[in-house]
Image (spheres, rainbow, N blue to C red):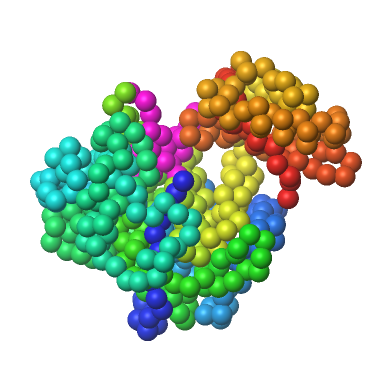
Amino acid sequence: MTKPLPFARRTARIAATLLAFAPLPVLAQALTTQQQTKVDKIVTDALAASQVPSASIAIVQGGKIVYAKAYGNQGPDVKQTSADTRYQIASISKQFTAAAMLLLEDQGKLSLDDKVSKYLPDITDADQITIRQLLSHTSGLQDYWPQDYSPEQMRHDTTPQKIVDQWAKKPLDFKPGTQWQYSNTGYVVAGLIIEKVSGEDLMTFLRKNIFQPLDMHPVNQDTAYGPGFPTGYHRYALGPVRPESAPGKNWLWAAGELSMTASDLARWDIARMDRALLPASDWEEQEKIVRLTDGSSSHYGLGVSVGQRDGDTVISHGGEAVGFLSDNTVIPAKKFAVVALDNADFGRATSTITDGIMDLLLPAAQDSAVEDHRLDLAKKLYSDLQSGTIDRSMLTKDADYYFTPQAIGDYASSLSPLGKPESFKALGGPKLRGGYVNRNYMITYPNRKLLLVTYAEAGSDGKFEQYLVMPAG
């Protein structure tokens, strides 16, 4: 899961920041009218289905921003919905922290393989943890914000040092390098190292070395409240959509401190495609999958997730803040990127928007024979579950563990009365996630629809890692 950290209180410094904001670039190779209409529908449908108030998107094709638009209600502090509005991007900020480390390595001021003890010896087992492990979530440091809500402590201001003192001096969750576990704490430690080595505060270093050269104009999200900034929203279950209270200052910092426009983030994506600003070797280093000590893949580089789509490398990351979600997906070889930002921490509209736009503008090639076979396997397992007996050879070890006698009994008792579906169809195409292939299906009956979400090992006969049936929205 992508975790960021909270954001701070409203402040009067906002108005001054807005004056410095630069206009969007002239759009090149704009989408056709038909494509624009379809993109608009993807976004508006996602907002309507999730009840998320607003979203802002940017699309890159051919290495240029070809579409940038905001939709919906950005809140009472924004007079008119605008793509110039900065949203909190939370954990997407991690790739900028990692880039700062790479730049300092280029300057000969540190090595990614340095032990943390060289800079912060008071961290637990600092002599066993490398900077690379901080950036790849393999350090073993306990995450200080695993929740998808803001706990009581986060109502109050903190400092990076207080976070380190409370969480980075606990016993490690595992021996460094042996497991992958998301850790915002590791990024706060990394931020302190950056400041110590560079002699500058983190935001100043990023602004001078990355943001100004790329004509990006982000602000610290602790200041991203008040006039000109979107309001973040929350929802309890299916209750009313309510404005979310801002947490205390400094909780996100190096783990997710930035607020920017979708087009700002798209400019960074273009630099990645062009191997600009940073040396090409730095981009490659950030996108290289870090492997665990047993040789297995973490599916993560330095501040970015790394996957595949039709043989091309996909670089992506999401962000979750108090009242905000974000999603950024880049396919460097295709010179293609999608940015989706919203002002709600529920509904997952950003993922729906990103997937929809990618399927529209860069549809994944599908092997029809493989997909037909996977559909047959999905149908067979569904029928088996209706009868209460399943072929466990179709399941991975994890899926076999999940389908306990109770789980099979509940599946059979709830699905058997429905009988044979009217239709059983694939939704979209296969997508790689977490080392497995995700395929979703719509199962239709006369009076109801069910959604089936599957993950499977690669290949036409790959075992199911997940097979979950749920009501369709």
Q: Height in image: 366 above or below 195?
A: above
Q: Position of residue 448 (x, y in %)?
A: 83, 44
Q: How many marks?
A: 0
Which residue shows up at 71% across the image and 24% down it?
A: 381
Asked whether residue 62 appears in the rendered view, the answer is no
* Residue 304 lies within the magenta run: yes
Asked whether 103 or 242 is in front, the reply is 242
- Image quadrant in which you'd find residue 154: bottom left
Which residue shows up at 52% across the image and 22% down it?
A: 397
Asked whether 232 or 85 is in front, the reply is 232
- Image quadrant in which you'd find residue 378: top right
User: Magenta residues, as a range?
Assistant: 295-316
* Residue 305 lies within the magenta run: yes
Asked whether 371 or 291 is in front, the reply is 291
Which residue shows up at 75% across the image and 38% down it?
A: 442
Q: Position of residue 111 (x, y in %)?
A: 15, 42
